[in-house]
Amino acid sequence: MIYLDYNATTPLHPRVLEVMLPFLQEKWGNPSSPYRFGNEARGAIERSRKRIAGYFGCKPCELVFCSSGTEADNLALRGVVHALKGKGNHIITSVIEHHAVLNTCKALEGEGFRVTYLPVTDNGVVEVAELEKVLDDETILVSVMHANNETGVVQPVEDIAALTREHGIIFHVDAVQTIGKLPRRIAELGADLITISGHKFYGPKGTAALYVRQGVPLGAVTTGGRQEHNLRAGTENVAGIVGFAEAVSLAFESVEAEGQRLRELRDRFEKQILALVPGVRINGAQASRVPNTSNMTFASVDGESIVLGMDLNGICISTGSACSTGDPEPSHVLRAMGISAREAQGSVRISLGRSTQETDIEAALMALKAVVERLRGISSIDGNGQSR
Ligand code: PLP
């Protein structure tokens, strides 16, 4: 199998598994228990928190461990707007967010909050000027992602943070797709709340954290025990947290060299696919992107069919976000970039990772060329969009 879908998920790194095993086998105490066996688990959690804070440039108490990026996004959005209900009811986000944010905003609209969805440019970028236009006295929260999961396009979150700070508005960043891909200490982004998720950078699935800048008003969403500074009730996933910290460490150790390596592979792939196959466009190519991601539109073919065709060749790619696979709707991200519904249906994403080698890229190129040619051969429309 050639796996080219690292934005969907990544395998557990052997080093991560190694540090987790003792907490799954011998050290399985409840971190809330008062005896030494429990304290051992508690100590492991707090050491992990401190370790991650060191890499992020924040205080350990500013990290809340969660069970997924989705949960951390929910905690950020719901936690802030419920805490600030008396102050205003306006939320601003962008049309290209992950459904973890978009569907939470939809649910909050149902509770009476007003949500503005910022547009993006043809290259998939949220413009600060657009945000400035819609800020009002009722705005209590802005949520814009760091890099988009489908296109890899990086958003100007530092500039947005400067603007929201000036207006005293809370700013949340979903940075799930940038840890291990961009060499930034997340606290330097200037945001008040930042979501990260372990399974996107070789950590265990079901592990995540929300960075909450000290002093940011946040209400709990899950109620129960007093875990995670009273913000996220529930017995902690001790082994998961220990593995998550190891994955953060790995991500920061190799981010520069790995980024450079993947960027070269990705750029070579794009150059060759444009040369080999007519009727291809790279989406978001003119914008700043994370180094591992390429989103392509193939004229006159269906993206789902390309994915299935590639699967028959043992190659895993995707039509966009894993969460919307099987969703007949064209990608909301590509549609927001002004791409027609029909073209959006003909789009696929490849995302590279640690195991990707040049030979994988070569094999994927040849397979993609053959699959698209075969599909176009049986399609009633040619590569230039003309009916046969
Ligand atoms: N936000 C972004 C940008 C993502 O890409 C994803 C997962 O694809 C999520 C949030 C959700 O993270 P999780 O899978 O940990 O719930």
Image: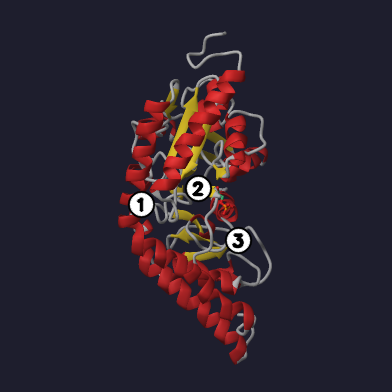
Residue positioned most to the bottom: 36
In the rendered image, residue 25, in percent from the top left (x then y), is placed at 63, 81
Please name whichever residue, 352 or 322, is drawn nearer the observer in this view of the structure.
Answer: 352
Q: Residue at x 32, y 42 (%)?
A: 159
The span from disc 1 to disc 3 (Cα, nearest Å) is 22 Å
Determine crowd level at label 2: few under 14, some 14-19, many 20+ residues with C-alpha closer than 10 A: many
Q: Give the labeled residue for mark 3.
A: 206
Q: Is mark 2 within 8 Å of ligand 1?
A: yes
In the picture, measured across the screen, residue 385 lies left or right of residue 285, that is right
Using the image, determine if residue 237 lies above or below residue 272.
below
Q: Give the labeled residue for mark 1.
A: 182
Using the image, determine if residue 51 lies above or below residue 187.
below
In the picture, measured across the screen, residue 327 lies left or right of residue 14, that is right
Q: Is mark 3 within 8 Å of ligand 1?
A: yes
Q: Residue at x 51, y 82 (%)?
A: 43
Q: Amino acid at mark 3?
A: Gly
Q: Disc 3 vs disc 2: Cβ atoms closer than 8 Å?
A: no
The span from disc 2 to disc 1 (Cα, nearest Å) is 14 Å
Q: Quadrant of residue 57?
A: bottom left
Q: Give the labeled residue for mark 2.
A: 7
Q: Earlier in the sequence, mark 1 or mark 3?
A: 1
In front: mark 3 or mark 2?
Answer: 2
Determine crowd level at label 3: few under 14, some 14-19, many 20+ residues with C-alpha closer than 10 A: some
Colouring method of the image: secondary structure
Please name whichever residue, 299 or 129, is drawn nearer the observer in this view of the structure.
Answer: 299
In the picture, measured across the screen, residue 110 lies left or right of residue 121, that is right
Which element type, helix, strand or loop, lies under badge 2? loop
